[in-house]
Image (spheres, rainbow, N blue to C red):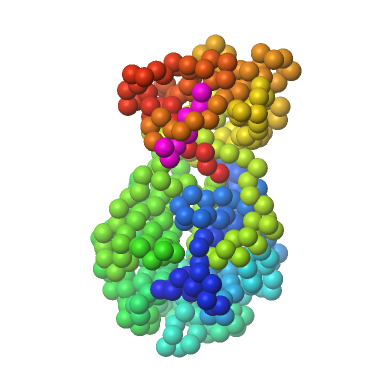
Amino acid sequence: MMPRRSSTLDADGAATTAYAFVYFTETPNQSGASYGLHLAVSRDGLHWSPLNQNQPVTTPTSGQQGLRDPFVHRKQDGTFVVAATDLKGLDLGRNSQYLHIWDSADLASFTGYRHVRMHTMNTHTWAPTIFWDAGRRRYGIAYSAAGGGRDVLMVNYTGDFRTVSTPQVLFDPGFPVLDGDIVVDGGTTYLFYKNLADGNTYGARSPTGAPGSFTTYTTGLRQGNAMEAPLLVKRNDGTGWWLWGDGFSLVGNELHAWAGSSVDGSAWTLLNQRDYTPPLNAKHGSIVGITDAEYDAMTARWGLPAWTRLKSWNFPDRYVRHYNGSIRLDAYPFDPHQDQLWRTVPGLAGSGGVSFESINRPGHYLRRSGVQTRLDPDDGTAAFRADATFIRSTGLADPGGTSLRSYNLPTHYLRHSGYVLRLDPLGATLNSTDRHDATFRFVS
């Protein structure tokens, strides 16, 4: 397929059945920050599994030797190109005239790394997006830069992603804009962007995609205090679109998702966080449709996560974590982010159950202590093994979730109460709150 266009086939006619996400990572105190190229995959486009244990699959070696805002595009020949901002860390005042660029046949390897100069101005070159301009028979590389005293979207054209044309102003609506994402669908070019004046994200469109031809057609979207890094994704099944964006809230920068039946309309429905799970610690990336063969090549090369996260059903912004030996639900993101990562192993007391070993405290398991829960080291006793074993069952609140019954207190289920995990007897007269408190989703 040309995933940023209207087809659901790749260049060889194979159906795109999955999705790949490229991104960089940050956490509130920067302990989980990584400014290399990260990859995640998804079968449904909503729940994501980081590859390579959420470590970079490649890292820039030129310029500031770090990246932000990577963008992946499937070229007309079916292969991929990745472009990214030349910037490492949070010092956004450091300007670069360059972009990092790689080639890839299948996203299982990256070749031809180069550092391409886009302009000679004393300004930044942020958040590239790539689109095919059919009229020019060239690719457009659009990015944010300061021109005429405010941020605008510039564009250079290229046929090989090595040499580029002289930059032009692609979009300047008269107020500062940032983070453009461009797709071509049905002969129309769509541009979604952040309005820096009000913090909202808007959509513009053009019949040609030519510089200066875009007109805004949507109302503003935001989640939290503002929204940036809009990301448009056409569903592989052809039934609609998703719009992702980085929203700002009290706990930090979080990825949110909307659904729409048509990119040409202005109606976007905010999805419940229960229905999607972004890649762990992901910031400002992009998504492309991939085939079964590409999915298999990527997972074989980079490997799926060695961990599981337990996501609350009725508070889906919260994950089960350990904290000073206790087990509780906290709103994500938080640090240390590894406190929410669990290795699921066959039940210590019997293979019919499951046990949860902490990733960052190896040998320590989630276990019951009375009707409370703790993270404790395995002491080798039969009592500990039984306390640390749980039986998985269909979610009490919804069959799409999972509930966990105590192995040695079989009438009791794990549930949260006041954001603390405990075990309570849950009989035939469960109320809705009980059922929801005792239901979780296993995610990566």
Residue 73 showing in the rendered view: yes
Q: Position of residue 246 (x, y in %)?
A: 43, 52
- Highlighted range, magenta: 399-405
- Residue 443, relative to residue 140: is it above or below? above
The quarter in which the C terminus is drawn is top right
- Comparing 15 with 297, the one in front is 15
- Comparing 335 with 413, the one in front is 413
- Residue 269, relative to residue 147: is it above or below? above
Q: Position of residue 159 (x, y in %)?
A: 56, 84
Q: Residue at x 32, y 66 (%)?
A: 263
Give the residue at the far bottom of this rendering: 136
Q: Residue at x 30, y 53 (%)?
A: 269
Q: Is residue 22 left or right of residue 180?
A: right
Question: Is 345 within the magenta?
Answer: no
Give the residue at the far right of this rendering: 380
Give the residue at the far top of this rendering: 370
Residue 331 showing in the rendered view: no
Q: Residue at x 41, y 42 (%)?
A: 274
Question: Is 404 within the magenta?
Answer: yes
Q: Residue at x 44, y 74 (%)?
A: 7
Q: Position of residue 16 (x, y in %)?
A: 50, 67
Q: Position of residue 149 (x, y in %)?
A: 40, 69
Specify the quadrant of the image occupied by residue 81. bottom right
Task: Say how many tags the image has.
Answer: 0
- Residue 184, relative to residue 124: is it above or below? below
Q: Is residue 421 left or right of residue 272?
A: right
Q: Is residue 64 left or right of residue 326?
A: right
